[in-house]
Amino acid sequence: MLMFTLKRLGLAILVTFTVSLLSFSLLFMSGDPASAIAGENASATDIEAIRALYGFDRPFLVQYADWLFGALSGDFGQSYYFRVPVAQLIGERLSTTMLLGVCGISFALVTAIPLGVAAAMRPNSLIDRTALFLSVMGQAMPSFWFGLVLIVVFSIQLGWLPPSGSSTWKHFIMPTVVLGYYAMPAIMRLTRAGMLEVLNADYIRTARAKGASETRVMFKHALRNAVVPVVSLAAVQMGFMLGGSIVVESIFALHGAGYLAWESIARNDLPTVQALILIFSLFYIVFTFLSDLVNAWLDPRIRVG
Amino acid sequence: MSEPVLKVDNLTIDIPMAQGTLHAVRGIDFELKRGETLCIVGESGSGKSLTSLAIMGLLSKKMRCNAARLDFSGIDLRKQSPRAMRALRGDRMAMIFQEPMTSLNPAYTIGDQLMEALQLHRPVGRAEARARAIELLGKVGITAAESRLSQYPHQLSGGLRQRVMIAMALMCEPELIIADEPTTALDVTIQAQILRLLADLQREMNMAMILVTHDLGVVARIADKVVVMYAGEVVEKGSAREIFENPRHPYTRGLLRCIPVPGKTKPGEHLGSIPGIVPSLIGKVEGCAFRSRCDVAEAACASDVPVRRTGEDHMYRCIHEVQAGAPS
């Protein structure tokens, strides 16, 4: 298990460096950063002055190393637009996004896994069809539309929940549902498919032959084997939620990191964009690493050679 | 002699299919006492595995199972609730399956799975269950039993896994053990060991054993009684001695001809084989199902086939009255 963890960790670190190099290169992919900052009508001397000021005249690798060491100590430079340290800017926004992401994925898992198991226990039954209907809806409905419908019903008509903001836990209910419902269908269908496959396995018959109850067969013997691919999927979905919840954050006016990314791209605020890309990628890397560990714990064939 | 542990009378299993009903098992009967070994012999699709699953109550819900009688130690299995069947399974009747490679749960240790078998039925603590697991692993000939408990199935060879399966089946000292082709997936050298082990344990624990197999060589070594199945039907049954010395049904004779006999079969000599395949059992099956492959078939085989008895307990289903010892 230790060897396995170290191997995965080494891999994760390698990927992190690759991603950091890519996200830093973005600065130079969108043209000359100095003239972009100077604006359209800047004179050649102004551009040169800015180039020297920001250090764009140094060799690429030197700039990268400078930026990377800064990033490692939590210094991502100054935001061009907000004129505050990027780290501070992101720090304020990230907690909202992380809270939303954790709630969203939890909501998705808590609804999708029991539904997937129930659907697999009785294929083509009413509950299976209902689950299928719900998952097709979740996949087909755009988040912005579903979010607006929830606001119309629960905020405007019933007045139960606040439509926007992030000051109380009530503000997070609707965003959680919208975000979680988007991730739910895939997890549900994968759980169902995995369970259907596992339920035909010989060891399930063995468990029944031992006299295990159906509940025990389902949850002890089948689910643990069926859920391995679900963990990997959930990790990717979680990364997606943290990085890509821009739509949901805008609808409910939750000023999170996703929203910040969208703002910064629009404003050409490159240090912020670079830092966000690195952080979002880190989320993917960390969650993939964690899901590898969870799967190794679930399935001894991964961890014990 | 004591009361039979198992009495099966006119057991039928029907499987509804898109093309019609598949009559997979058609009127099986046999009985079995403690300490006896009954071998059910037949080729793939003859219904032998289904018969054993039916006794365990493990048939899929889609299959319809009927019997005039299905008694286990005086309990009418036909009338038991799923909960009552569950209480019997693994406790008083246990089963060993064909595929040791896939019959153990890959996610749990050998110890977990062995202990579960006991703890499902007995109010024992972990320490006691563990001690029992170690005892049984020793009994099935696994060395360093204690260290095996923390191993996972994928760390064991097929032969070892099958030993674990046997230990698991015996955790609660069942009265009846059903082994469904327990050696088919194993190497030939391991096959003999596992069979000997099963036979020894059966004698030692005085269990009734049903051994499902298609290997007559296996049967000759350990069976007390033999049931020969063909296309869902018992074509011949009797004591092992009778079946091997005086086989009456053409199918049984055919099977016996397929076994090479050391010392008697000459190198290069053609072994017997039975041409053709098992007929479809969908829809109504009339007459002798074996007639299309039988070399003594007649027109009369297409109508009802009489059940003939010779001596104590030897029955066969054929229109021909075969004399004992007649050439086949």
Image (cartoon, helix red, strand yellow):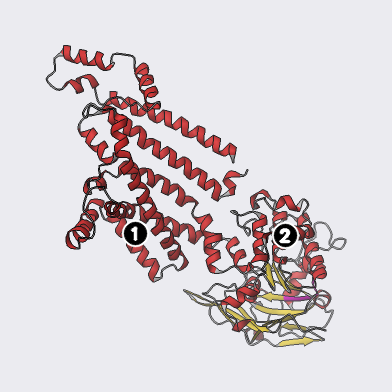
- Tell me if mark 1 has few (under 14), some (14-19) or many (20+) residues whose alpha carbon lies within 10 angstroms of its own: many
- Residue beneath label 1, please? A135
Residue A26 percent across, percent down from the top left:
30, 27
Residue B30 percent across, percent down from the top left:
72, 81
Question: The residue tagged with tag 2: helix, strand or loop?
Answer: helix
- Tell me if mark 2 has few (under 14), some (14-19) or many (20+) residues whose alpha carbon lies within 10 angstroms of its own: many
Q: Is residue B299 left or right of residue A188?
A: right
| Residue at screen point 42% across, 48% down | A233
- Between A260 and B288, the one nearer to me in the picture: A260
- Between B20 and A276, the one nearer to me in the picture: A276
The answer to whether mark 2 and mark 1 are in CB contact below 8 A is no
| Residue at screen point 25% across, 52% down | A142
Magenta-colored span: B223-227
Q: Is residue B159 visible?
A: yes
Q: Is residue B294 visible?
A: no
Q: Is residue A129 above or below residue B6?
A: above
Kind of residue at disc 2: Ala
- Chain of residue at mark 2: B
Quarter placement of the C terminus of chain A: top right
Q: Rounded to the nearest whole Å, what is the CA distance between mark 2 and mark 1?
A: 45 Å
Task: Give the quadrant of residue B66.
Answer: bottom right
Between marks 2 and 1 in the image, the one whose residue lies nearer the viewer: 2
| Residue at screen point 21% across, 13% down | A49
Kind of residue at disc 1: Ser
Quarter placement of the N terminus of chain A: top right
Question: The residue tagged with tag 1: helix, strand or loop?
Answer: helix
| Residue at screen point 59% across, 72% down | B58
- Which numbered circle lies on residue B133? 2
Q: Main secondary structure of the magenta part?
A: strand
Q: Is residue B13 left or right of residue A86?
A: right
